[in-house]
Amino acid sequence: MLSLANLSAGGHNPGLGDAKFEDDLHPTLADDIDDLMAGIESRLPPNFVGPPLDVGSLPSLPAPNTVYRVGGDVTLPSNGSYSDLAIIATGVISVGSNTTLENVFLVSSNQIQIASNVSLGDPNFCSTGKGEVVVLTKGEFSMGSNVTSYGGQYISSGSSKLSAGSTNNFW
């Protein structure tokens, strides 16, 4: 069995100590995935204005403070920078490498894939409480190496995979 003895996290994480003591980690938010996804638009920060836009594919330059509902797969291309964006997709959401996301919400009823060398969230999140990235999926969540996360939440009712040999930093 995989040991949790070397698992560590920054900040205040009271559940981590219990998980290490019991040598079992069960993310309870994953049990509530259907409730979390229902009416997600009403749970977004107030800067997201107007009704969600139902689109077949995400525009190449998404409008800020907009919620997009996409009936299929979504790719945020490599070497991009995205902020103030919410994507709710029925298909796979893929984030390319060398990409920056701030104040972004990714919700998929399928799966979410984040490539390597990605920055998630605002580096000043701890002092401002703004710029978080939220990932919510009913399927698998995977993350490449060299990913830095500030104030992120990653919730998956499927498996969660971090790349082997990764140097991921979570703040």
Image (spheres, grey):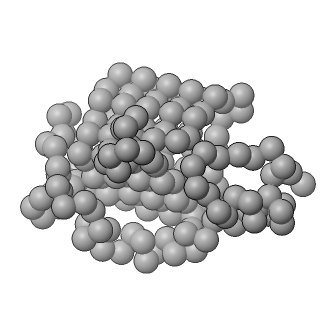
Give the residue at the far left of this rendering. Answer: 50
Q: Name which residue lies at 52% across and 75% down.
A: 32
Left or right of 29, for residue 165 = right
Q: Is residue 54 visible?
A: no
Q: Name which residue lies at 56% across and 27% down.
A: 146
Left or right of 2, for residue 165 = left
Find residue 143 and report its horizontal and vertical position in percent: 56, 39
Left or right of 165, for residue 68 = left
Q: Name which residue lies at 43% across and 77% down.
A: 35
Give the camera-side residue of 89 and 32: 32
Q: Give the mark count.
A: 0
Left or right of 9, for residue 55 = left
Give the camera-side residue of 92 and 117: 117
Find residue 130 and report its horizontal and vertical position in percent: 31, 48
Question: In which quadrant will I find the N terminus?
Answer: bottom right
Q: Quadrant of residue 94?
A: top left
Q: Name which residue lies at 81% across and 52% down.
A: 4
Task: Examine the rendered structure and indicate whether residue 97 appears above or below residue 154.
Answer: above
Find residue 157 and report its horizontal and vertical position in percent: 57, 64
Give the residue at the far front of this rendering. Answer: 127
Give the camera-side residue of 9 and 97: 9
Q: Quadrant of residue 161?
A: top right
Q: Is residue 129 visible?
A: yes
Find residue 44 and report its horizontal and vertical position in percent: 27, 62
Give the camera-side residue of 162 and 150: 150
